[in-house]
Image: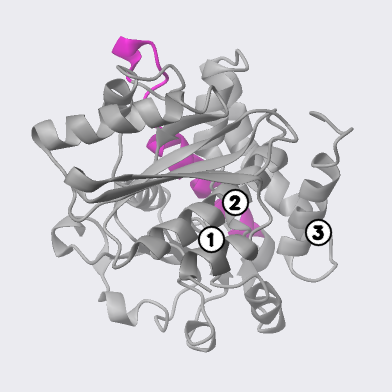
Amino acid sequence: MSAFEQLLKGWDGEQVAVRYEPDLDTWMFIGVHSTVRGPTGGGTRLRVYSAPEEGLADVLKLSAAMTRKFAVCDVPRGGGKAVLAVPELPTGEARTELLHRFGTFITSLGGLYSCAPDMNTSEYDMDVIAETCPYVFCKTAEKGGSGSTSPATAKGVFHGIEASVRFALDRDLTGVRVLVQGMGSVGALLASYLDEAGADLYVSDVDASRLTLGTPVAPEDVTGFACDVLAPCAVGGVINAVSIDQLRCRIVAGAANNQLAVPSLADRLHERGILFAPDYVINAGGVLHGAGLESLGWSEQQVDERLRGIGDQLLALYADGDGSPVHAADRLVERRLTPSAGPR
């Protein structure tokens, strides 16, 4: 059995569209996980993988996470995701050509999936995709979109960390030792919010030039670093079978998707007394921003209120008291994914 077959047979989603562009040596994957609550939406991840099956694995996990994220937010959309697995990150005309072809690919699905920014893509890339595709969220304001999702995602995670610290440590963020792993567009903003709030800030990134705020921590030392809060804001899977026993934190709460390499690690964290903020709850700010402003008619003020509400939602999940907060979040998702549920 091929790696592609194994991955697809172990997935509970609806369909995956795949295209290979030989002259660009690029695999395009669009994962449609669930249409129970409506057409799917989700970010477009542009990344170099060591093999195409890694890109497929990413799109399967990420589209499933989007289903949970939309359900938790009570937004009438289903989970989708796209991955562009490239040999190197393209620039200039090569990037434009790739994005145009990707837009044509999305259009061929007839509205089943709408794209948005994700790792290594921006609102400016959405403008380019929109030149060949009508199914695009979060274009620049000049092109009629809601712009970057990064500030909203970072602000939602910030409110989630505030709530988590209040629940687990019974204090505000002043002097709380927080390590932000990954200083990309979301992680850097989150770090600035934490710094303004008086946190004792530590930062880590594989690109040392990004470490302009806080005290640097080497990437290999992240999971064993003694801190109150570990905030994963890079790629997924930072909590795995090895790293979970290295953790020296009280709370794991960050912006990364799929922070747990396997779901069962949520129970291990709970057994260790480490509070885990379910990633698809705490990092939902981008969804609230894009869908709220562009689909649901929300004002900026309403979006801000929903971002602050991420902290309240986490506190409710923490207070559930039945094992890991992930189980409480999953139960909420299951209720909202019953075919008769609709938005509620």
Q: Secondary structure at mark 3?
A: loop
Q: Earlier in the sequence, mark 3 or mark 2?
A: 2
Mark 1: few/some/many CA within 10 Å (<14, 14-19, 20+): many
Residue 337 shows in this picture? yes
Are the two marked residues, 3 and 1, in contact with CB atoms closer than 8 angstroms?
A: no
Residue at figure coordinates x 46%, y 26% from the top left: 108
**Point 57% across, 74% down: residue:** 250
Q: Label 2's element?
A: helix
State left or right for residue 284 relative to residue 35.
left
Specify start and end residues of the magenta stretch as a single range: 140-166
Q: Indicate yes or no whether the magenta region holds residue 323.
A: no
> Which residue, given by chain and number where applicable, does mark 1 sit on?
258
Q: Which mark is residue 65?
A: 2
On the picture, is 57 further left or further right than 125? right
Q: Quick check: is 143 in the magenta stretch?
A: yes
**Residue at mark 3 to residue at mark 2: CA–CA distance:** 23 Å
Q: Amino acid at mark 2?
A: Ala
Q: Quadrant of residue 122?
A: top left
Who comes first in sequence, dot 3 or dot 1? 1
Q: Measure the C-alpha gap from mark 3 to mark 1.
A: 23 Å
Q: What residue lies at 29% left-to-right and 31% top-to-bottom?
A: 101
The spot of residue 91 in percent (x, y) is: 12, 39
| Image location of residue 24, percent across then percent down | 19, 45
Tell me the residue that label 3 is attached to: 319
